[in-house]
Amino acid sequence: VFEAALLADNQRRASAVRARFEHARITALNLIGAPGAGKTALLVATILALSDRACTVIEGDQATDNDAKRIAATGCRVVQVNTGAGCHLDAEMIAGALGRLEPNDGSLLFVENVGNLVCPALFDLGEAAKVVVMSVTEGDDKPLKYPHVFRAASAMVLNKVDLVPHLEVDPAQLVANALRVNPALAVFSLSATRGLGLEPWCGWLRARARAAA
Ligand SMILES: Nc1nc2c(ncn2[C@@H]2O[C@H](COP(=O)(O)OP(=O)(O)OP(=O)(O)O)[C@@H](O)[C@H]2O)c(=O)[nH]1
Ligand SMILES: [Mg+2]
């Protein structure tokens, strides 16, 4: 009962945040993935590749501002949110961060959620879409074992494809498992640190931003 009330309260706040984004034509993406999947590396590479677009970032972590510093080094405006013991961001935290961030009308806003494949799937942040970020090192069965986030997401980034030759993992099987859970998932295989395969992902982001304009 407590959890249902908590989620209902979050949903109300998320709807208000979403209305605010739509009014300002801001495209907000909620990036969710396990610790170390490469969410921050993906954001750094994406921001540099989309240098012609206005972007801002909300960084969610239990502790430290390490990731905010990595984003700030690209020249992008960023706000860090620390959740302490919390395992996910919620809509109230986003509303608070927006007061500090003040993203421009028509811009792209990336939210990096706390590293966790489970809890963040439950909490609507008012985003236009959730993106699940996975790396090939996590194993090809993960979409079947943690289906909720794959079902909730509109896209999956499969990161660290540069490491495939060193692993036993079958990336085709991983993608097939993800599509079994959610046939509508847009899939982007890439290497954030090597800058491989970024084009289709950036194209998808541009199309989302155009749709909001
Ligand atoms: N080989 C390889 N390493 C990568 C790639 N992307 C990220 N990494 C490395 O993976 C590690 C984790 O990357 P982060 O960007 O910190 O991952 P994260 O998902 O933001 O981690 P948390 O915020 O702690 O959940 C770092 O050492 C990165 O350099 C990639 O495409 N290829
Ligand atoms: Mg990170």
Image (cartoon, rainbow, N blue to C red):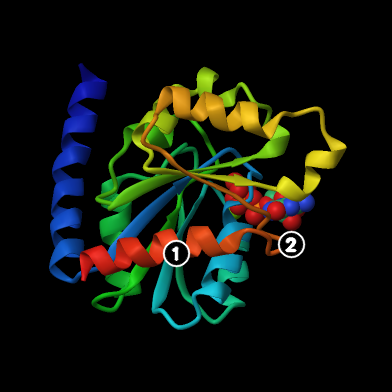
Q: Residue at x 20, y 47 (%)?
A: 14
Image position, residue 208 (x, y; %): 32, 61
* Vertical side of 105 occupied by 175: above or below: above
Q: Quadrant of the C terminus?
A: bottom left
Q: Is residue 39 above or below residue 2?
A: below
User: To which residue does mark 1 refer?
Assistant: 203
Callout 2: CB less than 8 Å from ligand 1: yes
Tell me residue 110's x, y (percent). Answer: 42, 61
Spatial CA distance of label 1 from label 2 is 18 Å
Q: Residues within 10 Å of mark 1 (few under 14, many from 20)?
A: few
According to the picture, the residue beneath numbered tag 2 turns out to be: 194
The residue closer to the viewer here, 144 or 105, is 144
Q: Pick the quarter of the image with the N terminus.
A: top left
Residue type marked 2 = Arg
| Position in image of residue 76 (x %, y %) | 49, 77
Q: Quadrant of residue 197?
A: bottom right
Three-letter amino acid code of the residue under disc 1? Gly
Q: Are marks 1 and 2 in contact (CB under 8 Å)?
A: no
Q: Is residue 115 visible?
A: yes
> Quadrant of the rendered structure where residue 173 is?
top right
